[in-house]
Amino acid sequence: MKRIFTNGYLLLLLIMLYAPIIIIAIFSFTESPVLGNWTGFSTDLYANLFSGGVNNSLIDAIKNTFIIALTAATASTLLGTIAAIGINDLRYGKRRVMNFVNNIPILNPDIITGISLFLLFVSLGISQGYTTVILAHIAFCTPYVVLSVMPRLMQMNPNIYEAALDLGATPYQAIRRVILPEIRPGMISGFILAFTLSIDDFAVTIFTNGTDGLQTLSTYIYADARKGGLTPELRALSTIILVVVLLLLLIVNIRSRRQARRAEALSQSNNPRRR
């Protein structure tokens, strides 16, 4: 009975999590403007996305979302990697303090972060728009990149950097040729996480996008829902984003497994055989 209850609870939880996503994906293949009303199989919603059959505001929101997400993810990956390397090089006490400071923005509610950044930009007299949204997303995503890169640094041999210096490498060469290849999986995971968080973010964006009409997908969906309904093409767009994210996760996991198998095979080949 305990096993049946546990499996049933897990199944119910998975249904609650994934049923709305599956429903949106299914009804993205019908042109009915109302979700839940099946009017026959059709790919018109996908065709409208790629042929310009939707309003310009949605197209602009999609472009803004991906430009901001790519820029913020790239910058936060660079800054987060540098910060993680610096934190890992600290002594134990200082490292704990810096890890605690890095975790504060992650645990802090998004709305508090958005209000804080809004007040900061207003106090500095910075006009809100593209620049403030990108800066806000970089500040919001960088701690997650640090959190993704730190485990790879902790698993790495701490003497490998000094060994590279002893062999004649400059600090820049040691970082580029020794440390970065070791932590590359963490950097990729951090980039994907930052990219996903930037696309998904609403609270920080709504407080920093200003009044010039800059919209991302999250703010567009919010404004569209307040009008009494959602644009049908959003179902197709949500399905495409879901498939792309799943493919990226599969690729990252497959590469991580292959690298783990290669490392295990290499370690076994280096060990002396027992007679």
Image (spheres, rainbow, N blue to C red):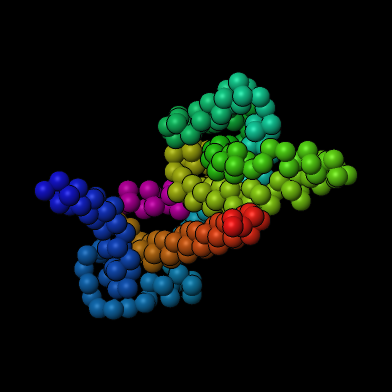
Front-lying residue, 15 or 108: 15
> Looking at the image, which residue is at 69% across and 37% down?
158
Q: Main secondary structure of the magenta part?
A: helix
One can see residue 156 in this view: yes
**Image-based side of 158 in relation to 191, left or right:** right
**75 above or below 94?**
below
The residue drawn where x is 32% and y is 48% is 226
Residue 273 is situated, as x and y percent measured from the top left of the image, at 61, 57
- Can you see residue 237? no
Image spot of residue 157 (x, y percent): 67, 41
Q: Image height check: is 181 above or below 171? A: below
Q: Which quadrant: the C terminus?
A: bottom right
Q: Is residue 228 left or right of residue 251?
A: left
Residue furthest left as drawn? 1
Estimate the x, y position of residue 128 in percent, counting from the top left. 58, 38
At x 67%, y 45%, the residue is 78
- Whether residue 219 appears in magenta in the rendering, the answer is yes
Tally the marks. 0
Q: Residue furthest top?
A: 93
Displayed quadrant of residue 54? bottom left
The question of residue 206 being in magenta is answered with no
Q: Nearer the viewer, residue 38 or 161?
A: 161
- Region rendered in magenta: 214-227
Q: Quadrant of residue 263?
A: bottom right
Q: Residue at x 39, y 64 (%)?
A: 239
Residue farthest along the front direction in this orientation: 275
